[in-house]
Image (cartoon, grey):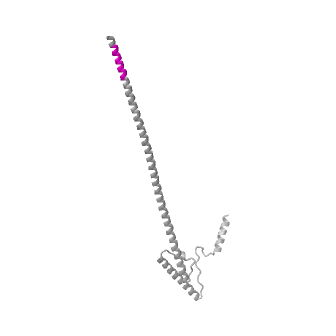
Amino acid sequence: MHLQYFASNEETEENMQNSQEKETETNEEKSAEKLQKRLGSETARRKALEDELSKVQEALKGYKEKEEQDRQSKLSEQELLDEANKKVTKAEEELKLFKAEADVRSSLSKEKLPVDFVPALLVSIDEKTQAENIDKFTKYMQAYRETIVNEVMKDKTPLKPKESQNDGKSWRDQIRENYKKVKESE
């Protein structure tokens, strides 16, 4: 009996150990299953968050691109406006100069003065300056006319204009000299 007791005691201990091992295994399996489920749910949650993050990043990128395009379009609009303003200003100045030149030509033609070379010297955007230039030129031309008329009345021919930087040589003489120099250098 004693042996049976011992054998049954051993069986019980073995059963207990087996049951404890089974319990441990089942507890471990249950824990592993719980961890697997938790890991699966955390993985799904992480994937959902990553998807949401990528969508938000794409939206932010699109917003930044649109904002940059708007800034560029506003900048280009401003540049276009500046360019158009410059063209308008230039056209207005040209119109003023054209009108001023027409005024100078009409003023000089009334006084019967030459109008071919003078407008470039007399024309000004400022009307006051233009009027002063015309008055000065008119006075100068009238004084020149009077000197020529006085010379003619004295029965003298007017003096020839002084030749400048050609030492009294005519243009023909200068051409001949230049031609000789070129021939000698060859």
Counting from the top left corner in percent of width and height, residue 70 is at: 46, 57
Q: In this picture, is 92 found above or below 47?
A: below
Which residue is rendered at x = 46% and y = 51% of the image?
Answer: 62
Query: Position of 160 compared to 5: left or right?
Result: right
Does residue 24 show up?
yes
Foreground of the two, 156 or 92: 92
Does residue 144 show up?
no
Counting from the top left corner in percent of width and height, residue 77 is at: 48, 61
Which residue is rendered at x = 50% and y = 65% of the image?
Answer: 84
Q: In this picture, is 126 found above or below 42?
A: below
Based on the picture, tell me whether residue 68 belongs to the magenta stretch.
no
The residue most toward the left is 2
Foreground of the two, 33 or 112: 33
Counting from the top left corner in percent of width and height, residue 161 is at: 58, 79
Q: Quadrant of the N terminus?
A: top left
User: Magenta stretch mostly in which secondary structure?
Assistant: helix
Which residue is rendered at x = 42% and y = 36% of the image?
Answer: 40
Q: In this picture, is 65 found above or below 81?
A: above
Residues shaded magenta: 6-20
Foreground of the two, 131 or 176: 131
